[in-house]
C-alpha cells in the first residue's frame, strides 16, 4: 500500500495563476482532508470530505475549491493564487468506520506564490 | 469551533531529562486527542493518542494524560534523547461528524546532548 500520496511535491506559481493539487489514498478511507501549514504554526483545515461526492468547508476555505469525484482522490484547486497561499499543504484520510480516528497524512506539497 | 492552545512554544532539556508539553481545548464534545511529532520538511507523525474515556496512556518513554473536567491534556517524554528533538503538536477532534483535527501551535523541543 502506498498510503496517502500527493502530487506535486513542490510548485512555484505566479500571482493569479491556477493549479490543482492531487491527493490519492489506497486504503479505502471514507474521510479525506486538506490542511495548510504556515511557518511556525499548526495545521489548519481548509476543506474536507466525508465520502465520495461530498465536500465541506473547514476553517480557512477562502480562495480554494475541492472535489471528490472518486473515493480515492481528493483534489484541491486554487483558481487565482495569491502570495498569502504560500504554504505547505497536507492531505489526510481517516477510515471512517470501526471507531477509528487516526489520520494518515500525505508527504505534503510545498507551494510558493510569487 | 474548537480552539486548542499549546505551551510552551519552545522547550530545551538535557539528554535524559523529562519533557512535558501541555494543551487545553475548548469544545467539550472533543473526544480524541492525538500527539504528533514533526521533523523539518516531513509530514506529522502520530506518536500517541488518547480517547476521552481514558485518563492516561503510556507507550515506552511517552505518555499522555487527559483531564476532561479541566479540558487539558499533556504529553510526557521521559529519558529524552537527541533524536526526540522536533516540533510536537497536540490536536483535538470531536470524533464524530467530520472528525477533523484542530491543532495546537506546536512546541519546538530541543534535547541537548
Image (cartoon, coloured by chain):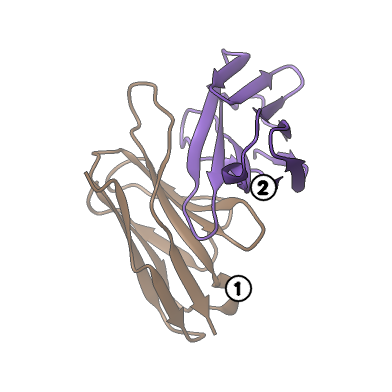
Q: Position of residue B39 (x, y in %)?
A: 54, 52
Q: Quarter-wise, where is residue B27 in the image?
A: top right
User: Disc 2 sits on a residue from what chain?
Assistant: B
Palette colour of chain B:
purple
Left or right: where A81 falls relative to A107:
right
As displayed, is residue B22 above or below residue B41?
A: above
- Find the distance from the CA under tag 1 to the CA under tag 2: 21 Å
**Dot 1 corresponds to which residue?**
A84
Q: Position of residue A107 (x, y in %)?
A: 40, 56
Q: Position of residue A58 (x, y in %)?
A: 53, 50
**Dot 2 corresponds to which residue?**
B106
Assess disc 2: are there few (<14), some (14-19) or many (≥20) residues with their C-alpha within 10 Å of its C-alpha. Answer: many
Task: Tell me what residue is drawn at x 69 percent, y 26 percent.
Answer: B73
Q: Secondary structure at mark 1?
A: helix
Seen from the viewer's position, the closer of residues B91 and B27 is B91
Left or right: where A50 falls relative to A82:
left
Q: Quarter-wise, where is residue A79 in the image?
A: bottom left
**Which quarter of the image is occupied by the N terminus of chain B?**
top right
Task: Tell me what residue is drawn at x 55 percent, y 72 percent.
Answer: A86
Which chain does brown denote in the image? A
Seen from the viewer's position, the closer of residues A30 and A12 is A12
Task: Tell me what residue is drawn at x 69 percent, y 33 percent.
Answer: B16
Task: Tell me what residue is drawn at x 24 percent, y 46 percent.
Answer: A71
**Figure label count:** 2
As displayed, is residue A97 above or below residue A84?
A: above
Amino acid at each position: 500500500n502506498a498510503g496517502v500520496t500527493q502530487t506535486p511535491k513542490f510548485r512555484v506559481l505566479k500571482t493569479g495563476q491556477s493549479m490543482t493539487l492531487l491527493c490519492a489514498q489506497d486504503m479505502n478511507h471514507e474521510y479525506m482532508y486538506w490542511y495548510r501549514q504556515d511557518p511556525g504554526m499548526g495545521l489548519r483545515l481548509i476543506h474536507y470530505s466525508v465520502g465520495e461526492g461530498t465536500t465541506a468547508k473547514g476553517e480557512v476555505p477562502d480562495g480554494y475549491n475541492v472535489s471528490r469525484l472518486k473515493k480515492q482522490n481528493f483534489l484541491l484547486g486554487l483558481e487565482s493564487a495569491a502570495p498569502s497561499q504560500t504554504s505547505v499543504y497536507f492531505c489526510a484520510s481517516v477510515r471512517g468506520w470501526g471507531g477509528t480516528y487516526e489520520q494518515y497524512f500525505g508527504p505534503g506539497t510545498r507551494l510558493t506564490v510569487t | 469551533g474548537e480552539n486548542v492552545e499549546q505551551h510552551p512554544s519552545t522547550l530545551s532539556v538535557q539528554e535524559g531529562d523529562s519533557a512535558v508539553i501541555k494543551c487545553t481545548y475548548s469544545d467539550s464534545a472533543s473526544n480524541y486527542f492525538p500527539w504528533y511529532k514533526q521533523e523539518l520538511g516531513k509530514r506529522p507523525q502520530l506518536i500517541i493518542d488518547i480517547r476521552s474515556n481514558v485518563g492516561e496512556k503510556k507507550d515506552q518513554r511517552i505518555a499522555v494524560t487527559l483531564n476532561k473536567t479541566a479540558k487539558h491534556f499533556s504529553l510526557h517524554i521521559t529519558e529524552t534523547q537527541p533524536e526526540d528533538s522536533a516540533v510536537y503538536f497536540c490536536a483535538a477532534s470531536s470524533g464524530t461528524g467530520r472528525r477533523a483535527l484542530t491543532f495546537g501551535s506546536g512546541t519546538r523541543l530541543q534535547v541537548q546532548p
